Every structure is written in C-alpha cells, then in structure tokens.
Image (cartoon, rainbow, N blue to C red):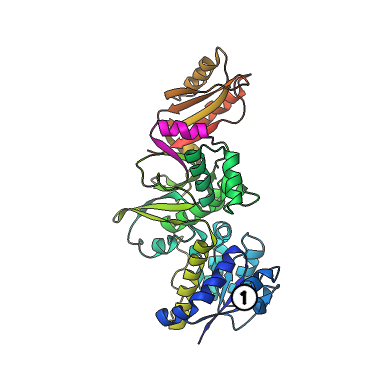
C-alpha cells in the first residue's frame, strides 16, 4: 500500500522534490520497501506543477491537502511563519505527518508545532531546515546523543559564503558580489535575510536547541551580517593569517548558551577556513566523539530537495513498518542565553577616518578610556576624499567595552565617515 504525499509549495525546492519522486520512486520501493505516491500539489499557480509533469494533481487551495483523509504526509515548502504555520498546524491537527524545510517557522514557533505533533501522535521532520543537503539534524538527534555537545559552529548560509569567497578571491566589492550572487540565483531580489545574518540565526537557533536540549529561538540569537565587510578587511585578514567567514556559533558555557551570528576571522588552518562558494560546513564538538565536521552544498534546489525527500522517506518507512513517532521535542533543559555583551575575545575594527593630524591620538585616547588594548594598527590606502582606512586588532577585550569605544569614536567630530567594520576573532 502506497504512502500518499501532499506537497504545498511547488517552487524551486518543491519542484526538486517532484523530480526526485518521478525519477526514483521505483528505486525507493525496491531498495527501501517504501512505496510513495504524490497525489496532490498546491501553489498559487499551476504553471510550476505543469512544468514538472504533475499538472493534473494541482490545486490552489491547501485545504484540499490538509482535509484529504487519504494523504499520509504533508510537505510544507512555502516558507515564512504565517500561511506556512497554518498549513503545518492544520495538517498536524488532521493527523497527518509533516515534513518541512521551514527554518523560520521552527526557530520561532518550534515549541508550538512540535507540541501539536505530539498531541496528534504524528511525526514532524525538519532535517532540511538547516544545511541544505548536509545531514546534520539527524546525527545530532541520533548518532551523537551519547555525547555532551559543547560547540556547534559553522557556515550555514551559502549565499554569504559565496559572496565572501568572491570578494576574497577576486577582489569584488560587496555590491559586485551581491549582484553576481543574485544573477547566479543564490541570492534573492531582497537579500536581507541572508546578508543581515537572519537566515543563519534561525538555523543556529534550531541546532543549539537540539545540541543543548534547551529551547533557543530566533530572538535569542545576536545577528550581524556582512554588509559592512570590504575587500580591505579581507586583505587585512589574509595578511594576519586569517580568513573571514560569516559564522553561526553556539557554545555551551558554565553561564549558559552563547549563541550568535557574525563575520568572524578564523585562522587559515582551521577546518572551516577552506569552505568556499555555496558550500556549508558545520563543526560539532562532543565530549567523547571529539571534533566532527559535516560538509556539503547549502544552496540550490537539488541539495534542499534531497534533504526534504530524505525526511519523507524516513517518515514513510515508519508508517509502512508501523513505527510510532520516535523523535519529538528534546528541549528539556532551561539553560539561560548569554548576552552578547558578556563576550571577551579579540576584535578587528576598521574605520574610514579623516586623514589629518590628531585623529590617531584621539582614537587611541578613546580606546584607553574604555580599557581596550590595541595589539596592532595598520593604515591602508588614502581616499580621494581625504580619508584613510585605519584597521585595529585588539588584545582580548570585553564586547561591551569595544562597542562603547566604537560608539564614542564615531561620535568624534570630523573623524569617522560611514559605518565601521567590526569582525570578531576566533582563535
């Protein structure tokens, strides 16, 4: 007997799922003993369904899927936290298993939808919400549960990694790299979720919740993107033996969970330093397993569709074999979230400053006043507008002191132009 599938969302990833079912459904039955059948697809227009050869399955009303008593698994791929939340909750309430790739939904309403799945006695799978084709959520929930995980850290946004790679390797400006990422289909017309770090923040909230058995939501994550990063910063990092990556970081500390997203300088010999282009990599440290790293494509229809269909097949196997839902919410601890101001680490700062006498002395005075010790300072280039780039690297300093110093320097009259660049340094 076939496990019947309803798909809500026939865009890039949804289309990839249709293609996988059309191409491999026979192999799934032979190799896994799992017979799946796509019986209904929903989106705003029938054009995408027709393009993938399933126009006869089209509906523009998702209730035709959530209310269909024959459908066993609903795949939600429309994204966002409004209509998607309704689709997921209605499907669960109707006793249907749900597979979603919606990181925003899981990072903001994860407790609600997981509680709804438990109440209905059905399964909720969301392995595709983080890392594209990288199987990271499954290992955290299964293979690594014998460990106390101390760190989950990685490159989880392919768009920004692609842009930083282009800026570093080809000397592109931020604007040029963004335009190329958009032309290649890696960045949306409105790229803010990627370049402001919000996409990565949602993903690390999910990973931290699983790794540390404690609920972390999107609002808990400090997020800063790459919009102020320039080739000058990447050149300076290279000169100092570092590369710059937008890292999503979660540490278990004695004080609680340190969770954040921001541009980060890491040593050139770090495992994450050579992860370039649209690739993602997630680095996990457990007390018994030690250091592990998961690597793969984080952007693109194929990678995401692969992860979605992996979840679909796992849930379908459970249904076929009569296995009850085995993975529910694991957020049993209530660890506090450490504020970003509690950080102590090294920092890189770049100011576009007026090229005139007294500027360096004024800035040095502010740093000293806020107990920020400078390890090195490099002056780079001279602008036609009478400005110069001043790049500083600190000794270990407190986040709150560094921020206060930057704010005061930016307030000095006729000193700094534009927004400074701030990059934290992970040794």
- Is 237 in the magenta? yes
Segment colored magenta = 229-245
| 318 on left or right of 185 | left
Kind of element beneath mark 1: loop
Residue 53 placement (x, y as % from top left): 62, 75
* Residue 398 visible in this rendered orientation of the protein: no
| 252 on left or right of 182 | left
Which is more toward the observer, 395 or 166? Answer: 166
Assess disc 1: are there few (<14), some (14-19) or many (≥20) residues with their C-alpha within 10 Å of its C-alpha.
few
Which is more toward the observer, 261 or 268? Answer: 268
Seen at 59% across and 54% down, the residue is 185
Q: Quadrant of the C terminus?
A: top left
Q: Quadrant of residue 77?
A: bottom right
Seen at 56% across and 30% down, the residue is 420
Q: Which residue is mark 1?
A: 53
Residue 138 placement (x, y as % from top left): 42, 64
């Amino acid at each position: 007997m076939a496990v019947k599938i309803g798909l809500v969302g026939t865009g890039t990833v949804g289309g990839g799922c249709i293609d996988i079912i059309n191409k491999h459904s026979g192999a799934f039955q032979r190799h896994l003993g799992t017979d799946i059948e796509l019986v209904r697809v929903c989106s705003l227009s029938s054009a995408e369904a027709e393009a993938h050869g399933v126009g006869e399955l089209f509906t523009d009303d998702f209730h035709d899927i959530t209310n269909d008593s024959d459908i066993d698994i609903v795949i939600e791929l429309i994204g966002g936290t409004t209509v998607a939340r309704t689709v997921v909750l209605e499907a669960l309430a109707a006793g249907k298993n749900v597979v979603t790739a919606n990181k925003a939904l899981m990072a903001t309403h994860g407790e609600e939808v997981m509680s709804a799945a438990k109440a209905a006695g059905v399964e909720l799978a969301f392995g595709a919400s983080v890392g594209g084709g990288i199987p990271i959520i499954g290992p955290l929930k299964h293979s690594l549960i014998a460990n106390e995980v101390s760190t989950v850290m990685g490159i989880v946004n392919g768009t920004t990694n692609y842009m930083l790679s282009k800026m570093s390797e080809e000397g592109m400006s931020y604007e040029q790299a963004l335009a190329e990422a958009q032309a290649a289909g890696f960045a949306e017309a409105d790229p803010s979720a990627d370049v402001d770090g919000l996409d990565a923040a949602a993903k690390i909230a999910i990973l931290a919740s699983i790794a540390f058995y404690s609920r972390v939501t999107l609002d808990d994550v400090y997020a800063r993107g790459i919009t102020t990063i320039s080739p000058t910063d990447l050149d300076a990092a290279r000169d100092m033996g570092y590369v710059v990556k937008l890292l999503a970081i979660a540490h278990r500390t004695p004080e609680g969970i340190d969770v954040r997203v921001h541009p980060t300088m890491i040593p050139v010999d770090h495992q994450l330093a050579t992860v370039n282009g649209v690739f993602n990599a997630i680095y996990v440290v457990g007390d018994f397993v030690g250091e592990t790293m998961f690597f793969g494509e984080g952007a693109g229809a194929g990678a995401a569709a692969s992860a979605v269909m992996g979840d679909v097949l796992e849930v379908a196997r459970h249904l076929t074999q009569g296995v009850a839902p085995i993975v529910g919410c694991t957020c049993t601890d209530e660890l506090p979230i450490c504020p970003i101001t509690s950080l102590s680490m090294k920092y890189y700062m770049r100011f576009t400053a007026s090229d005139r006498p007294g500027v360096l002395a004024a800035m040095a005075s502010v740093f000293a006043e806020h107990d920020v010790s400078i390890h090195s300072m490099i002056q780079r280039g001279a602008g036609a507008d009478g400005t110069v780039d001043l790049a500083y690297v600190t000794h270990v300093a407190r986040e709150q002191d560094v921020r206060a110093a930057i704010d005061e320097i930016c307030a000095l009259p006729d000193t700094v132009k534009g927004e400074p660049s701030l990059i934290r340094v992970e040794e």
